[in-house]
Image: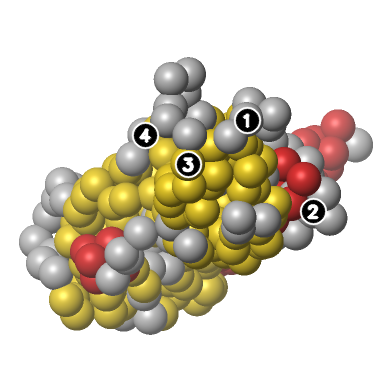
Amino acid sequence: MKSNWQQLLLAFVLAVFCWYLVTGREKVDSWVPMKVEMTGMPDGLFIKGGMLGSVEVLVRGPRGMVRKIEESQLVYPLNLSGITPGKNMVGLDPVNIPISKVFDVVEIRPSRIELDVERRVSRDIPIKPVLGSPVPEGYVLAGTRVRPETARVTGAEKAVSAIEDIRTNPLTFGPASGAVVEERVGLAIPEGLEASPLSAMVTLHFAPRLGEATVRVPVRAFPPERVEIGQKTVTLRIKGPVQLLNDKGFEDLVEARVDVKPGTEVGRRDMPYQVKMPQGCELLEARPDKVSVTVK
């Protein structure tokens, strides 16, 4: 009974061993994903398109071992040391696949890839501010200052060469922000490009919008007890801030006067007059330029 048990066990072990020899050495084919990693990329070049993150490789080997390789992560080192700007056709050589010699690489899909390569350049490009709010009523934009004035933009040569300026994000301000608006705003970087810095300080200077107005004002004489004016009013053409010129009380702020100095001889004569106006205004024309004055 004991002898029969040992013979049965030996037969079982031999059967398992024979089964392993038959099935373990049976070769099968399997498609396995393989990651692509770039190596040897030349400095100053940029891959614009065509790069693949992974490919598929058809592996042939023992059934039992193929299952293990399916679970592992194969990596294909793609040597790009020989690429140049333009279209580059790069073949995938099975010899470069780091895999055990018990496996045969039957096929790589795709067997080659086409890379669109451009030169990577950097250039200093002017920063242009963008207004996100209208200029306050009655004012004009008198000056703009940007610090820094340029940004260093890096990217594909064609894309960088096509840029004339780097614009800021819209700068917003209220209608009563004052004569100066200063704010740090970000830069609107085109997709695919890099820039340094990423923001700029923008200063806007506003000045009153100027216009012209014609007013008729009375002429006053000093001292009034000694002087009589023959020309009661004069017509003045004045340049100044529009908001001030449009004010209903602007004429009351303008004065025409004749000052008679002590010792002036009695009699009638034509004399020039002085015009006083609010600050920021300029006299363009006065009609007449002199008035008739009688000194008593």
Residue 13 shows in the view:
no
Tag 3 and tag 4, C-beta contact below 8 Å: no
Q: Quick check: marks 3 and 1 in contact, CB under 8 Å?
A: no
How much space separates mark 2 and mark 3, taking CA atoms?
Answer: 40 Å
Q: Residues within 10 Å of mark 2 (few under 14, many from 20)?
A: few
Q: Nearer the viewer, residue 103 or 248?
A: 248
Q: Secondary structure at mark 3?
A: strand
Kind of element beneath mark 1: loop
Q: Which mark is residue 148?
A: 4
Labels 2 and 3 touching (C-beta < 8 A): no
3 or 4: tag closer to the N-terminus: 4
Q: Residue at x 47, y 23 (%)?
A: 261
Q: Which residue is mark 2?
A: 247
- Gap between marks 2 and 4 measured at Cα: 41 Å
For the residues marked 3 and 4, what is the alpha-carbon distance in whole angstroms? 69 Å
Which of marks 1 and 4 precedes in the sequence?
Answer: 4
Q: CA distance from mark 4 to mark 1?
A: 65 Å
**Secondary structure found at label 2:** loop
Look at label 3 and name its amino acid. Answer: Gly
Q: CA distance from mark 3 to mark 1?
A: 11 Å
Q: Which residue is mark 3?
A: 267
User: Is 65 on the left or on the right of 160, as rendered?
Assistant: right
